[in-house]
Amino acid sequence: MNNKTYTAKLSEIERKWYIIDASNKPLGRVAAEAAKLLRGKHKPTFTPNLDTGDHVIILNCKEVILTGKKLDQKIYRHHTGYIGNMKETSARSMLDKNPEKAMMLAIKGMLPKNSLGRKMLTKVRIYAGSEHENQAQKPEIWEVK
């Protein structure tokens, strides 16, 4: 009986390009789908210790929605490195000023917290509007359920 675990080789990895339209969809659902594509979990050749994922283009980030009371209650925090300089931004102002950053932070939180996760994050392109400059890569549309 042959019970060997399949491991993808770097030369076998094929990368495709996908477009996700985020308009009128929950932020977390879109981020989860993007993280799944970036990680490569949708492929039968998924290998946990290799970057087998695809490139992802996310459009219409400014039209993403937050369910429940998250728009007023969710707070994004970061520290500048100086004493007492914890900066806070509400989800409402983050989505108004910089919706791409809100999407990037959501995706980043769903990827591995190591050098492999940082490498995967470089394969995502996020746009607030519906225009993108990656037509040459012939991206396919990925439908979020």
Image: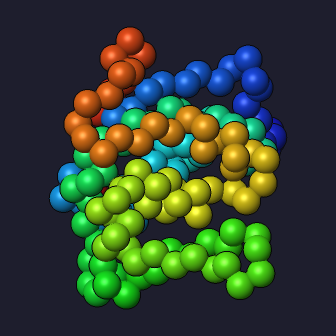
- For image coordinates 64% across by 80% down, the residue present is 86
| Residue extending furthest toward the left | 24
- For image coordinates 69% across by 69% down, the residue present is 80
The answer to whether one can see residue 47 in this image is no
Question: How many marks can you see?
Answer: 0
Q: Can you give x and y, in whole percent of width and height, for residue 78 in the image?
A: 62, 72
- For image coordinates 76% across by 74% down, the residue present is 82
Colour logic: rainbow
User: On the rendered image, what quadrant is the C terminus found in?
Assistant: bottom left
Measured along the vertical axis of the image, is residue 12 above or below residue 115? above
Q: Can you give x and y, in whole percent of width and height, for residue 113 in the image?
A: 73, 59
Left or right relative to 107: residue 25 = left
- For image coordinates 26% across by 30% down, the residue present is 131
**Between 105 and 89, the one nearer to me in the picture:** 89
The answer to whether one can see residue 90 in this image is yes
User: On the rendered image, what quadrant is the N terminus found in?
Assistant: top right
The quadrant holding residue 12 is: top right
**Between 48 and 60, the one nearer to me in the picture:** 60
Measured along the vertical axis of the image, is residue 7 above or below residue 114? above
**Between 38 and 108, the one nearer to me in the picture:** 108
Q: Can you give x and y, in whole percent of width and height, for residue 34 in the image?
A: 45, 48
Measured along the vertical axis of the image, is residue 132 above or below residue 33? above
**Between 57 and 96, the one nearer to me in the picture:** 96
